Amino acid sequence: MDNSIIGIGIALGVSFFILYTRKKKWMNPKITWLICIGLFSIGLYGLNITKPEFKNDRIMFLGFLAPIIYWVFDRVFKKISFMIHNRDFILYLRYSDEINDSFGAKNPQVKMSDKLFSFGLLIIIVAILFIGIGIIK
C-alpha cells in the first residue's frame, strides 16, 4: 500500500471531520487543538527522520500537518465573522446542520461572508494538500 494515501486520507478526513463537527458540544476547541497539535508533532517528527528520496513517506507525514493549518484558518475566519456579524460564521455546505439543504430551501440567515468563509475553507483544505505534494515531488 502506498503511504501517501494514508497522509492524504488523514489530511482530508480529519480536516473535514473538524469542519463539520466544529459547533458540536462534544467537539470543543481544546479537543481540536489537542488533535491538531498531536498530528502536527507526528508529522514534523516524520518529516525530520524521513530521507528526501522517500517521497511517498514524506507526503504521508505532510498529511499530518494539514489539519492544524486548516484549524488556524478556521479560527481566523471565526474571529473575522465575530467582528462583522457578532457571531460565528454559518457553515454553508451540503449536509451541514447549520442550514436547510433541501431542494429549493431558502436560508435567509446566511450572509455572503458565510458563503465565502465556507468555500474558502474547502479551498484551503484541498490547496494545502496540493501545494505540499507539489513541493515534495
Image (cartoon, rainbow, N blue to C red):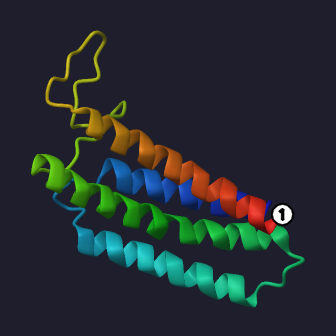
In the displayed structure, would residue 132 be above or below residue 43?
above
Percent from the top left, x then y, of residue 134? Answer: 76, 59
Q: Quadrant of residue 61?
A: bottom right
Q: Nearer the viewer, residue 102 or 116?
A: 116
In the displayed structure, would residue 98 be above or below residue 89?
above
Q: Quadrant of residue 96?
A: top left
Horizontal side, residue 25 vs residue 62: left or right: left
Which three-letter amino acid code belongs to the residue tagged 1? Lys
In the displayed structure, would residue 66 be above or below residue 42?
above
Residue shown at 20%/54% (left/top)? 24
Q: Nearer the viewer, residue 59 or 88?
A: 88
Quadrant of the snapshot with the N terminus: bottom right
Residue shown at 59%/52% (left/top)? 127
Q: Quadrant of residue 105?
A: top left
**Quick one: which residue is furthest to the front in this view?**
84
At mark 1, the secondary structure is loop
Residue shown at 51%/52% (left/top)? 124
Quadrant of the snapshot with the C terminus: bottom right
User: Label 1: few (<14), some or many (≥20) within 10 Å?
Assistant: few
Horizontal side, residue 84 vs residue 96: left or right: left
Horizontal side, residue 130 vs residue 70: left or right: right
Percent from the top left, x then y, of residue 35? Answer: 40, 73
Percent from the top left, x then y, of residue 54? Answer: 86, 75
**Quick one: which residue is furthest to the top in this view?**
104
Residue shown at 22%/33% (left/top)? 111
Residue carrying label 1: 137
Q: Is residue 96 visible?
A: no
Percent from the top left, x then y, of residue 95? Answer: 34, 32
